[in-house]
Image (tube, grey):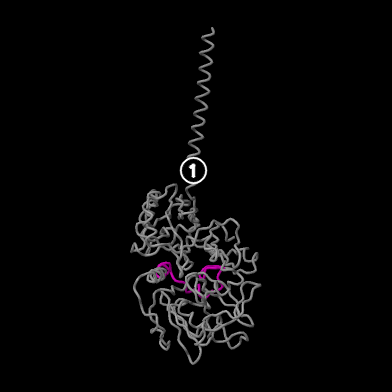
């Protein structure tokens, strides 16, 4: 009987053990499924299309030294006439490539003429090494002069000289009506800074300093250099801010009133307001149908993860070290990234990667998306899908890796959609392995990107626009 009881007890224990182990196995399997799902976005296909309604951000009201940021062709933009003439998606990508070509030429070893040419004929503006990059697509409303005149300006981390239209027009600034405007002399030290801010040597009209810039997309502006009062947000006013008073501008500016330069040269707004803001600014670039912000002097988020800025005097450079797709860190030699380097740019739309890095990303992404039908390429975008038969899709998460951590791309920055039947991976490869990689604005969407220039670092805080 004792033997029978012992056998029965062992059988019961074995049964309980089996149940426990199976249960643990089920939990382990379920945990693995959860881990896999954490590496995927589930996206409503309808969310891939641009919104037609506008939702405003509360972050501008929270900071008096802040501007509302909108896409110039989006529903939140007040440039209605500009929206009617908005470029199609293929044109946007062509213009984006022109900007990228200008950036790459800036870093190339080819030396080109950067001398100033008298602007009696706009076509005589010389091609330069790409300091002036393109017309951009996010705008803020800036106050200029006394009394204050509000102007819609493109803001651009890849440009330095701020300029405004000083000619007849609704969105133009008239310096003759401002009590705080005065011209800059050709002989002043400020005039000598024009070269580093524009890539061209300044001209001289009588005794007044002149500037001239041709952008990478073919647009141009030229005019006088002056000092004026600048209003930032609802509270801060700066006197004697140097800017370009444009006498003529043509190209892709549309109804925009000018450009705000947020680069690193002495004439950028960041350098000219250093005494108050300590070269600290941040922005959140919104998705279509929403508004973001451009803030000075303080971050809107306390959760930003910071990455060191690398040493580059012309652009904001980062040390990209790798790429993650889903739960897989791609096998890309570190030398692929370090040889050419990486910059972050508010004006480039599509992130550009070195050829080997992009090839690895495309292969991993294509493998993960193998159940979805392919679509024809769209301009520079060669990995496209037809989601017309789907309501939701599962998409692998993508992260850019740096030595101190990863920046996971928001799901809004993974695709560039030309309708639901042609939805493309929003990354592209450079043609030359020596060309610098560019962290574009689509992949920055919904992040507060914090530029602490004096601190030598850039921070990223997700979900920051709303």
The crowding category of the residue bearing disc 1, from other C-alpha atoms within 10 Å (few below 14, some 14 to 19, many at least 20), is few
- What is the x, y in percent for residue 195? 45, 79
**Secondary structure of the residue carrying numbered label 1:** helix
Residue 205 pos. (x, y %): 48, 90
* Spot occupied by residue 185 in the image (x, y as percentages of width and height): 52, 87
Lateral position of residue 352 relative to residue 466, left or right:
left
Residue 312 in magenta stretch: no
Up-down relation of residue 431 to residue 197 (above or below) = above
The residue under the point 45% across, 57% down is: 414
Answer whether residue 93 is magenta in the image: yes
Q: Nearer the viewer, residue 132 or 50?
A: 132
- The residue under the point 63% across, 80% down is 148
Image: 106 above or below 32? below
User: Which of 186 and 422 lies nearest the eye of the viewer?
Assistant: 186
In this rendering, the answer to whether 113 lies above or below 290 is: below
Asked which quadrant contains residue 103, the reply is: bottom left
**What residue is rendered at 53% in x and 78% in y?**
257
Residue 116, quarter of picture: bottom left
In the image, farthest residue toward the top: 1
Q: Quadrant of the N terminus?
A: top right
- Residue 171 image offset from top left, x and y in percent: 55, 80
| Closest to the observer, 348 or 76 | 348
Query: Bounds of the magenta span?
Result: 69-95
Residue drawn 59% across and 67% down? 295
Question: Count of labels shown?
Answer: 1
- Dividing the image into 4 quarters, which one contains the C terminus? bottom right
Q: Which residue is mark 1?
A: 35
The answer to which image quadrant residue 170 occupies is: bottom right
């Amino acid at each position: 009987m004792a033997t029978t009881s012992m056998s029965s007890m062992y059988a019961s224990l074995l049964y309980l053990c089996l149940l426990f182990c199976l249960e643990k196995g089920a939990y382990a399997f379920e945990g693995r499924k959860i881990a896999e799902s954490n590496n995927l976005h589930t996206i409503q296909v309808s969310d891939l299309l641009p919104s037609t309604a506008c939702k405003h951000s509360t972050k501008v009201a929270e900071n008096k030294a802040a501007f509302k940021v909108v896409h110039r062709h989006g529903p939140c933009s007040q440039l209605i006439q500009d929206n009617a003439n908005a470029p199609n998606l293929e044109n946007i990508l062509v213009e984006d490539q022109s900007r990228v070509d200008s950036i790459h030429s800036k870093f190339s070893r080819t030396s080109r003429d950067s001398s100033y040419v008298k602007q009696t004929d706009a076509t005589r503006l010389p091609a330069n090494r790409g300091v002036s990059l393109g017309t951009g697509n996010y705008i803020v409303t800036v106050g200029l002069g006394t009394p204050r005149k509000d102007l819609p300006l493109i803001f651009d981390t890849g440009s330095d000289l701020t300029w405004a239209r000083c000619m007849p027009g609704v969105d133009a600034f008239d310096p003759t009506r401002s009590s705080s405007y005065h011209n800059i002399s050709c002989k002043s030290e400020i005039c000598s800074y024009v070269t580093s801010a524009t890539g061209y040597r300044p001209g001289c009209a009588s005794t007044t300093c002149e500037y001239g810039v041709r952008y990478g997309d073919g647009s141009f502006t030229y005019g006088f250099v002056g000092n004026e009062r600048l209003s930032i947000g609802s509270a801060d006013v700066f006197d004697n801010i140097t800017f370009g008073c444009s006498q003529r501008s043509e190209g892709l500016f549309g109804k925009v009133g000018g450009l705000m330069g947020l680069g690193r040269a002495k004439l950028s707004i960041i350098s000219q307001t250093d005494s108050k803001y300590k070269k600290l600014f941040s922005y959140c670039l919104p998705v279509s149908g929403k508004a973001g912000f451009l803030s000075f002097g303080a971050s809107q988020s306390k959760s930003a993860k910071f990455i060191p800025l690398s040493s580059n005097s012309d652009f904001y450079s980062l040390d990209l070290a790798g790429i993650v797709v889903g739960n897989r860190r791609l096998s890309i030699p570190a030398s692929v990234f370090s040889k050419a380097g990486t910059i972050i740019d508010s004006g480039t739309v599509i992130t550009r990667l070195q050829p080997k890095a992009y090839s690895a990303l495309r292969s991993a992404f294509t493998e993960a998306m193998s159940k979805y039908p392919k679509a024809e390429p769209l301009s520079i975008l060669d990995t496209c899908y037809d989601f017309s038969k789907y309501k939701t899709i599962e998409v692998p998460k993508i992260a850019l890796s740096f030595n101190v951590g990863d920046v996971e791309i928001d799901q809004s920055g993974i695709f560039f959609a030309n309708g639901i039947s042609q939805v493309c991976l929003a990354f592209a490869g450079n043609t030359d392995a020596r060309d610098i990689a560019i962290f574009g604005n689509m992949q920055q969407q919904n992040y507060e990107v914090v530029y602490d220039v004096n601190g030598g670092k850039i921070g990223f805080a997700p979900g920051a626009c709303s």
